[in-house]
Amino acid sequence: MIVNCLSIISDPDRAAKSGADVPRPVRYALSIGRDYCVLGLGYLENSPIWGVEVLFEIVDDQGHLVSVPAGLFKVQDGRLPDGLIVKETEGNILIWPPEFFDDFFHDRLSDGDSDARAALAAVVERVCK
């Protein structure tokens, strides 16, 4: 799936209307007008930050895997890649590559773990080709 960035700042009013406990604007390291490859999606039922929201999993302009509200993008190519897995967790629906479900994957990635970084690179290569 390819999306085009329309805004780099989330809308706290939208989050408040969706039931967020602590709505606040979030600025993302994205570029307006740039296309991004969506690696996964998440539907959050009751997030304290987002309320009810759909999030895209993308690699931002700084090379970090981030969850970004879908409302900041326009879908350019809506085809989902093969191999995504759907799981429900705590009322949320996650549609991710299998690697993202590995124990502590996101934590290890944030810590700079070389195996997690290699796994992310493999996902990007496979999904965004």
Image: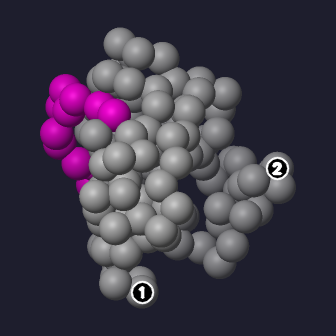
The residue lying at 48 percent from left, 55 percent from top is 23
- Residue 59: horizontal and vertical position, in percent? 54, 37
* Horizontal side of residue 124 vs 108, given as left or right: left
| Colour setting | one colour
Taking the view exactly as shown, the residue that stands out farthest to the top is 33
Looking at this view, is 128 or 14 the one in front?
14
Taking the view exactly as shown, the residue that stands out farthest to the bottom is 90
Kindly check if marks 1 and 2 are in contact, taking CB atoms under 8 A apart as contact: no
* Horizontal side of residue 28 vs 55, given as left or right: right
Identify the residue under disc 1. Answer: 90
Q: Is residue 28 visible?
A: yes
The residue lying at 28 percent from left, 58 percent from top is 17
Q: Secondary structure at mark 1?
A: loop
Judge whether 5 appears above or below 107 on screen.
above
* Horizontal side of residue 121 vs 17, given as left or right: right
Q: Is residue 6 magenta?
A: no
Looking at this view, is 16 or 84 the one in front?
16
User: What are the residue bounds of the magenta stretch?
Assistant: 72-84
Amino acid marked by disc 2: Gly
Q: Is residue 69 visible?
A: no
Q: Secondary structure at mark 2?
A: loop
The residue lying at 42 percent from left, 46 percent from top is 12
- Residue 90: horizontal and vertical position, in percent? 42, 86
Identify the residue under disc 2. Answer: 112
Q: Residues within 10 Å of mark 1 (few under 14, many from 20)?
A: few
Q: Earlier in the sequence, mark 1 or mark 2?
A: 1
The residue lying at 33 percent from left, 34 percent from top is 72
**Real-space Cα separation, disc 1 to disc 2, in angstroms:** 27 Å
For the C terminus, the image quarter is top left
